[in-house]
């Protein structure tokens, strides 16, 4: 009997080809796993970066709206403080308070306080209803002594020195300040301005105190909600509220807004369900740590079967902005529904895994075929390489398309040129067509006609003052006429070129179209200038003429007129038209609003009449064709007006108050910038007239 244990066991032999096959299979599997893993992390990082970029944009919008509301509050505060009646009563109250021992004062102080309240009450109601103003508070210095809370008239005489730092600083500096602060009654955005009054006893203007106007964050959050699809909330630390607000107001307002799991209260929110959302977040992450850090980093939360990107941004009050070492008093909480983003992300990840698995089995199959048949192996390799070349070609084509789009964007705003020292242009790039509308040949042959005299003088001056020791680039602004005959404004950067003898021979230049940026900047300055005119209490006629002159300074190719609706005579009358000729102004003046009664004076002026009738903008690109009568055609030839645009000025109740009319010396429609200017001017005129 043979002992099986004594029988030698044969070693399993593995061929070299099998070993090679196993090695290649394992290598392919490892590469496939690495590819899938890399693609997974790349997709995830791209998603996180996209959400982070969106979050930064959302917070930038919040900051912009915040600045706008602060400007509105400053304007309201300034208007209240500019009323001499308020100034006089505030001064009387201050003197009475000093005579009666300070704090709340006595009977005389109470009488003046009531009189001051009655004076501002009606204006306060209007500001509250129309502009959502929530706080109107008179403070006396030094420090901050409450003289009158118009929004809470039964609360006065308390000192706020260690609480209302914005008021304390305004009293010390006697200059305006703004920011967020929490008072004894509530929190809010506040703007404080100093109040001065004429002291009849001293026969001079003296400093009285501070007038403060404020509003809640509710208005700001509602504006954001109307414009972008995000939910925004303001969270305040409980301890901050406890240290500042009177207990009776904490009970009435803040107790119901306490967020469970968080040492905070919900000050304001754009969504009524945000409290429940925050309490859900508190169950999943350390929300108190987020409030403390408020680093603006995006986190993804699942709530009610929807994914949300949430961000906590630092919330600083007035003292916090002034003192960087002071801790945040809360946080700006922003959430965005990203369900579609996440579904797309998961879909991409699933496809990534499936593609990896499929690719692995396909390659394995090809590998098996390779070992079975060399010919099939070579064929499969050719197919794979062909596929890779096709993908590479597609990527190259895609890169070409990207670069082409980039070049097109540059061509729309830039062109290159070369000129000699005598202002003769020797080269101009083809992008001149996109910028000014001329071909290269047209521009080179008509340079002196297409560049104004001031531009030619500037170019000559730059050439005359250039020395061979100066090789630096030189930037300056010039003007040029476009294909429509309108002025465009260019920022030019030139580099001087010298020959072997260090003699200046030419300039190489890059011109950028800055017309829109220039118009926006000048329009903003004009708006501020007109607001200052209003604050300085100029007459309506002076303000309107100043506005018209400012518009004509921005758009140098037009003449502007403002026509007022005269309800008594049922006509349109000129209110401001400093540049129009007397003959043309007489034709414009007293246009009947009922065209059936008098058709002789309509003709080319129908634009403003149509604007009044339809409550819409009327553009006439060719007045000569639109004009009805012979007399009007002759008048147009004399005045050289070729086109017009009329914008109705509407009141808050959609009633026509006036029109703003632009008259052009060339035919054609207004530019996009012109339409922005006339629309903005319409809003300004409406504000002036109302």
Image: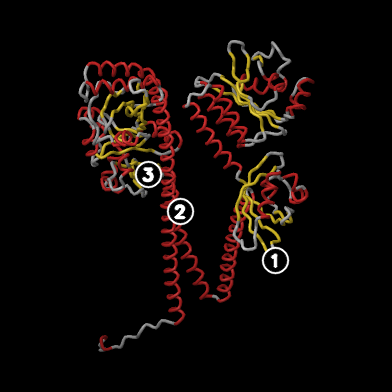
Q: Nearer the viewer, mark 3 or mark 1?
A: 1
What residue would you read off at disc 2? 348
Judge whether 241 appears above or below 512 on screen. Answer: above
Judge whether 38 appears above or below 527 on screen. Answer: below
Q: Which residue is painted at 57% across and 42% down in the image?
A: 517
How many marks do you count on the picture? 3
What residue would you read off at disc 3? 308
Which quadrant does the N terminus fall into? bottom left
Q: Which residue is painted at 63% across and 35% down in the image?
A: 555
Q: Which residue is painted at 34% across and 23% down in the image?
A: 202
Q: Secondary structure at mark 3?
A: strand
Quarter-of-image position of residue 662: top right
Q: Is residue 663 visible?
A: yes
What residue would you read off at disc 1? 499
Q: Is residue 139 left or right of residue 31?
A: left
**Residue 297 x %, y %:** 36, 50
Q: Residue furthest front?
A: 202
> Of the residues under marks 3 and 1, which one precedes in the sequence?
3
Quarter-of-image position of residue 498: bottom right
**Residue 664 x %, y %:** 69, 31
Residue neighbourhood size for the residue with mark 2, other residues' Cα within 10 Å, grouped as few (<14), some (14–19), many (≥20): some
> Of the residues under marks 3 and 2, which one precedes in the sequence?
3
């Amino acid at each position: 009997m043979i002992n099986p244990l004594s029988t030698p066991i044969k070693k399993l032999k593995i061929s070299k080809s099998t070993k090679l096959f196993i090695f290649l299979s394992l290598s392919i599997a490892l590469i496939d796993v690495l590819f899938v893993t890399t693609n997974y992390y790349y997709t995830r990082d791209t998603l996180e970066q996209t959400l982070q970029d969106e979050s930064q944009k959302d917070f930038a919008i919040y900051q912009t709206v915040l600045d706008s509301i602060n400007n509105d509050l400053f304007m309201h505060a300034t208007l209240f403080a500019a009323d001499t009646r308020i100034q006089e009563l505030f001064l009387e109250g201050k003197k009475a308070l000093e005579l009666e021992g300070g704090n709340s004062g006595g009977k005389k102080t109470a009488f003046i306080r009531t009189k001051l309240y009655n004076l501002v009450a009606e204006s306060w109601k209007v500001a509250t209803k129309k502009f959502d103003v929530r706080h109107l508070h008179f403070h006396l210095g030094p420090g901050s002594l409450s003289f009158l809370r118009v929004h809470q008239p039964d609360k006065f005489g308390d000192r706020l020195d260690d609480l209302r730092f914005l008021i304390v600083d305004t009293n010390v500096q006697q200059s305006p300040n703004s920011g967020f602060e929490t008072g004894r009654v509530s929190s809010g955005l506040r703007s404080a301005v100093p109040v001065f009054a004429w002291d009849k006893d001293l026969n001079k203007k003296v400093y009285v105190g501070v007038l403060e106007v404020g509003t809640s964050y509710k208005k700001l959050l509602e504006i954001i909600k109307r414009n972008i699809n995000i939910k925004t909330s303001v969270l305040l630390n409980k301890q901050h509220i406890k240290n500042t607000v009177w207990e009776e107001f904490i009970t009435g307002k803040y107790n119901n807004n306490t967020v469970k799991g968080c040492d905070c209260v919900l000050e304001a929110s754009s969504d009524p369900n945000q409290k429940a959302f925050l309490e859900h977040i508190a169950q999943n992450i350390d929300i108190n740590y987020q409030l403390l850090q408020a680093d603006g980093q995006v986190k993804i939360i699942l709530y009610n079967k929807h994914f949300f990107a949430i961000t906590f941004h630092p919330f600083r009050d007035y003292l916090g902005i002034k003192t960087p070492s002071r801790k945040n008093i809360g946080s700006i909480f922003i959430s965005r529904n990203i369900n579609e983003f996440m579904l797309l992300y998961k879909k991409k990840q699933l496809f990534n895994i499936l593609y990896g698995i499929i690719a692995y089995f396909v390659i394995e199959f090809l590998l098996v075929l390779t070992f079975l048949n060399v010919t099939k192996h070579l064929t499969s390799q050719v197919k794979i390489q062909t596929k890779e070349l096709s993908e590479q070609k597609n990527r190259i084509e895609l890169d070409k398309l990207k670069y082409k789009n980039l070049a097109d964007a540059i061509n729309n705003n830039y062109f290159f040129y070369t000129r000699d020292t005598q202002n003769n242009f020797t080269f101009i790039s083809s992008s001149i067509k996109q910028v000014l509308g001329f071909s290269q040949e047209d521009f080179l042959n008509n340079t002196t006609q297409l560049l104004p005299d001031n531009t030619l003088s500037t170019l000559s001056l730059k050439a005359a003052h250039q020395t061979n020791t100066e090789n630096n680039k030189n930037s300056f602004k010039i003007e040029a006429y476009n294909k429509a005959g309108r002025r465009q404004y260019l920022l030019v950067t030139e580099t001087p070129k010298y020959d072997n003898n260090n003699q200046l021979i030419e300039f190489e230049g890059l011109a950028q179209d800055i017309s829109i940026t220039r118009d926006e900047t000048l329009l903003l300055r004009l708006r501020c200038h007109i607001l200052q005119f209003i604050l300085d209490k100029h007459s309506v006629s002076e303000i309107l003429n100043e506005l018209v002159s400012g518009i004509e300074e921005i758009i140098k190719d037009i003449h502007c007129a403002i026509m007022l609706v005269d309800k008594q005579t049922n006509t349109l009358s000129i209110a401001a038209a400093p540049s129009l000729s007397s003959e043309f102004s007489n034709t414009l003046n007293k246009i009947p609003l009922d065209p059936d009664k008098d058709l002789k004076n309509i003709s080319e002026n129908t634009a403003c009449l149509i604007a009044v009738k339809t409550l819409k903008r009327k553009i006439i690109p060719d007045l000569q064709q639109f004009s009805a009568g012979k007399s009007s055609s002759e008048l147009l030839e004399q005045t050289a007006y070729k086109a017009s645009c009329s914008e109705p000025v509407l009141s808050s109740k959609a009633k026509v108050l006036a029109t703003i009319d632009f008259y052009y010396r060339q035919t054609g429609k207004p530019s996009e910038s012109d339409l922005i200017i006339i629309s903005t001017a319409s809003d300004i005129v409406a504000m002036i007239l109302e």
